[in-house]
Structure formats: structure tokens, C-alpha cells
Amino acid sequence: MAHPAPPVPISPVPVLAPLALPPITHAALLLDLDGTLLDIAPTPDAVVVPPELTASLRVLRIRLGGALAVVSGRPVEQVEALLGDAVEVIAGEHGGAIRHASGEALDRFELPRPSEAWFAAGARIAAAHPGALFERKANGFVLHYRAVPELGPVLREAMVALVDGSDRFVMVPARMAWELRPHGADKGTAVEALMRCVPFAGRVPVFIGDDVTDEDGMAAARRLGGVGLRVADAFGSAAGVRSWLRAAAVGGEWDPRGPA
């Protein structure tokens, strides 16, 4: 007699815990870009910006009284090229540069800059490992290994050797990448700087990010009496973040208990 096949196990649907959020009229919304608003792509240049995302951001910017910002490790110019006029305020390079409004000059902080020899060394490291990608920034650089995950430890070792003994630069992990950046530039300092300025001052910060580099922004928002949300825990994915933003834009308010 044949026995029935055992049932196929069903993966549990993650239950996203509700978190207390301030009402839109009292909130300042600070958003990471890659992995939070946009799906991660094989290379930074390959990301896709869904039209409904920019539409949601434009509406929410108005509902938030302008207190909407993108806080990214990318240069401000890259964020602007991706999102257009949907976002006025952009903190780029982990807070190394801030644009407070479209058309305004960047507010740059005095930060150490790697020597050309270090930039050249970073480029050589990437070139020596096919599939790795070198991304230069104003005050540092990134070695991406999204296409070759097995190179993560190798690239880390090379970066650690490069910064060994430096008291001005630090090597930090990012999403499938290692980044060289100056001490004093992180998303926490960016959040603190923005929250001192109009129209953010006096509001409750809500920071949303997905990566290790976003933890400073989350912590700063909490220190200032606000909320720091990790994408995987609160929304499941960048698509979940976009869906939540779209619902808030359409309804004019988000659920004060947190993401649905």
C-alpha cells in the first residue's frame, strides 16, 4: 500500500512588528536609497527607479512640509540624477555633502581626502580581481563585489592593509562592498545636521535603512527621540518600503502603529 507523500513544508510568512510612529504632521522622514527605496542591482549604475516611487515621494514631501530627505553613501549628484525633483534635500557621501534645496550649492564638511596614491591603489586592487568594481568618491572609495561574492574576504584583507595605521580613515562594510571613508562622516552625523535645519527642526525623525552603514542613522534618529527602522524587520524588502510610502501618499497619513 502506497503511503501518501509527506506535505511540502511551507515557509512561514514573516510577521513585521508594529512600531510607534509620529503622525506625518510631526515627522521628518529620512531615507536611505539603495536597498531601501531601490532594489539592489548587480552594479550601482544598474538600479531601476520605479515611476510610482518618485510620484509617492513628491506627494509625501508636501505632506511632510518639506521634511523629507534621502541620506545615501552615493554622491549627491548621483541621487539627484536618479530621483530628479522628487526629493529636494539630499545628504550624500554619508553626510560629507548636503544639498538643502534644488539648485543650491552643496554644503560640504571639512573632511580628509585620500591621496591619489590611495585612489590608485584601490583601483589596482579591483583590477587585479575580475568582477570587482572600484567606485571613486570625493572623500573615499568603494570596492564592490556583488558579482563575485567569494572575493569579499580577499578584498577586505586588501583594504585593511591599505588603511592600517591611519587615524584619519576607516574601512567599513557595506552591502556586498567595502568602503574607505574618513572618520567623522557617517549617516548619523548627517541625520543630526539635517535635524538642526528648517524644515526638519522641531520634528520627530524617522530614519529607514537596510545596511550596516545605515545603523548610525537609525541610532541618531533614536537619540533624537525618533525612530530608526531596518528594512528587513519593518518592511521585508525595498518593495515593501515603496508600498508603504505609496499608501501614505494616497491616504495622507501612515498607520501610527507602524508599517503594516
Image (cartoon, rainbow, N blue to C red):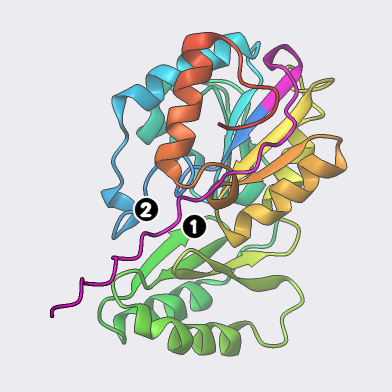
Q: Is residue 235 magenta?
A: no
Is residue 222 depicted above or below 182 in this figure? above
Residue holding disc 1 = 137
> Which of the image's four quarters has the N terminus?
bottom left
Is residue 211 depicted above or below 242 in this figure? below
Tell me the kind of residue under disc 2: Ile
Among all residues in the image, which is located at the extreme left?
Answer: 1
Q: Position of residue 120 (x, y in %)?
A: 43, 76
> Which of the image's four quarters has the C terminus?
top right
Disc 1 and disc 2 in contact, CB within 8 angstroms:
no
Q: Magenta region: which residues? A: 1-28
Q: Main secondary structure of the magenta part?
A: loop
Is residue 53 depicted above or below 72 in this figure? above
Q: Is residue 22 magenta?
A: yes
Q: Residue at x 36, y 84 (%)?
A: 150
Q: Position of residue 10 (x, y in %)?
A: 36, 59
Camera-near label (1 vs 2) is 2
Residue holding disc 2 = 40
Q: Residue at x 60, y 10 (%)?
A: 63
Task: For mark 1, give the secondary structure.
Answer: strand
Q: Residue at x 44, y 89 (%)?
A: 154
The mark nearer the N terminus, 1 or 2, is: 2
